[in-house]
Image (spheres, grey):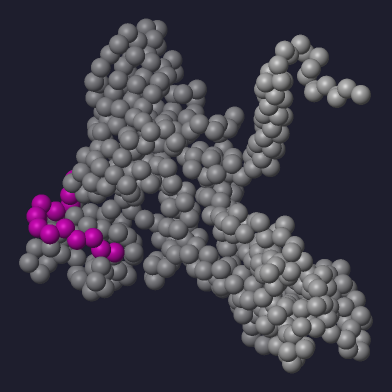
Amino acid sequence: MSAPALPGARAGFTSPGDQERWLARRRWARAGWLYAFMIAMSFVFLGPFLMGVVSSVKDNPNEYPPKLIIPQFTPAYIGRAWTQGVQGAADGWNGGLTPGRSVTFDTTVDSPADAPQAPPTVGLFTYQPTSLVALARQAQARDYAQVRTVETGRTGTTRTYRTTVTYPSLTPATGEIVRAKLGPASDRLTALLPGGRSVDVTLDTPEAQSHQYDLSETQLVELVRVGQEYRLRGPVFQRTPLQVDVQRGQRIVSSTLPPSDRQNFDRSFAYRNITPGVIGYTLNNYRRAFDETTTPQTGQSLFLRWVGNSFLYAGLRVLAALLFCSLAGYALARLDFPGKNLIFVLGVLFVQMVPGQVNLVSNYVLLRDLHLLNIWGLWLQGLVAAGGVFLMKQFFEGMPRELEESASIDGAGPFTTFWRVMLPQAGPALIALAITQFQGAWNDFFWPVVLLRQNTDFTLTVGLSNFRSAYGGQGDYGLILAGAVLSAIPVIIIFVVFQRYFVDTGADSAVKG
């Protein structure tokens, strides 16, 4: 009886080597199709998160149609943002506008022969971002800086204009330049130096005196130290907003940086900041998430506080789950005592089937009477997770009984057996339990929004809901998306690092060695 022909023999191959190469190509082709399918599915599932990440760095996240290639990822524009930051504040990373500096900004306008030939109208405008904790309006660059526009070139119908924004110092004095924050309003102007010392601010020019009532508490300013006096140079601006308008028939073609908003068929361009620096251009919404939640009196960022509260709450939940769920799961799986099955049905299965909203009123009243409407009360109401008990019970039931018998022969009691024999073998289940508990606590919203009263006690999910209410109505979704991306990063990192433990089996771990 002859041996069966190899696949592909009908293709006319003359040697076994040709057939092997043909089979290898088929294997690679199948593997390629499989990987292509997996990559396509990953884009399907990760697409919303990818678009959220891209939109979180856009200056205008509401653009339509949305684009993946945006100016904030373009090296040429990033380099220009650095240059503008250096011109405005000698800081290519953070940008801004400081007294005594000048910034140039180029705009190209298409003016056909039958259109008006007037130069564009250029001016600074007021841009006061919404803040969750701001108490007063901050000074604006338009009230201090001067704007001048001149034509610098002409090619056919296209004309290039250069706008120069000059911020003159409010004092002619020279000396050591110090940055400080203005103190509370009183009969004299005071400032708080970086070391914490409060000093009087001298207004030595009519220009400085005319602006003394425009400045509010916590405003960042530059001072000139002359002997024992501190003279006001002017406030420091993080943003330099610019508006460029041309007449009907003209059209703005390009500019040093792309506009934040364009209207009237490219006849009106608005730039929220022409001195952004690299961070202010690429990660502005992420910087705003921390800056616009800063308490003026203390300088503390509420966003950082919310992140810390979320880590604290999640860490406490994980520790409690590892301790109580493993103990309860081992007792229900290995020990014999009266009412064990009833406890499992009522205390584990039934609790998992009852929504948490059913116990809302009773738990809230109890925690209120105990004065625990804070992070500790939030942890207490979710101290033992029924799902975690069920997970650990099923894991311990699958472990060989020979381990306990060997420990019993050596004279170990139930607790010693659990602590020194069974628990060290439960590594995969404990890590899976820790990850699920961390993820559940990190993303928990219902109980935190019910129990937490003070904004300093908020977890990140509750804080982000405040972002939505404060910024969503204005269409400022970039900041909301930046906060959402930041909140997703810890869960993604933990899952990627420990994902292999989700598929490990407890039996394999128990019988090693």
Residue located at (29% from left, 64% from top):
181
Q: Is residue 319 found inside the magenta-colored segment of the image?
A: no
Q: Nearer the viewer, residue 177 or 9?
A: 9
Residue located at (53% from left, 66% from top):
306
Percent of width and height locating residue 42: 66, 40
Observer able to see residue 338: yes
Instruction: Identify the image quadrant of residue 419.
Output: bottom right
Percent of width and height locating residue 475: 57, 44
Q: Nearer the viewer, residue 55 or 339?
A: 339
Question: Height in image: 394 above or below 272?
Answer: below
Residue located at (33% from left, 43% from top):
277
Percent of width and height locating residue 389: 78, 74
Q: Is residue 172 found inside the magenta-colored segment of the image?
A: yes
Image quadrant in which the C terminus is located: bottom right
| Residue range (magenta) | 168-181
Residue located at (21% from left, 49% from top):
99
In the displayed structure image, the side of residue 478 where residue 241 appears, left or right: left
Observer able to see residue 386: no
Q: Nearer the viewer, residue 511 or 437?
A: 511
In the displayed structure image, the side of residue 364 where residue 113 appears, left or right: left
Instruction: Identify the image quadrant of residue 442.
Output: bottom right
Percent of width and height locating residue 423: 69, 77
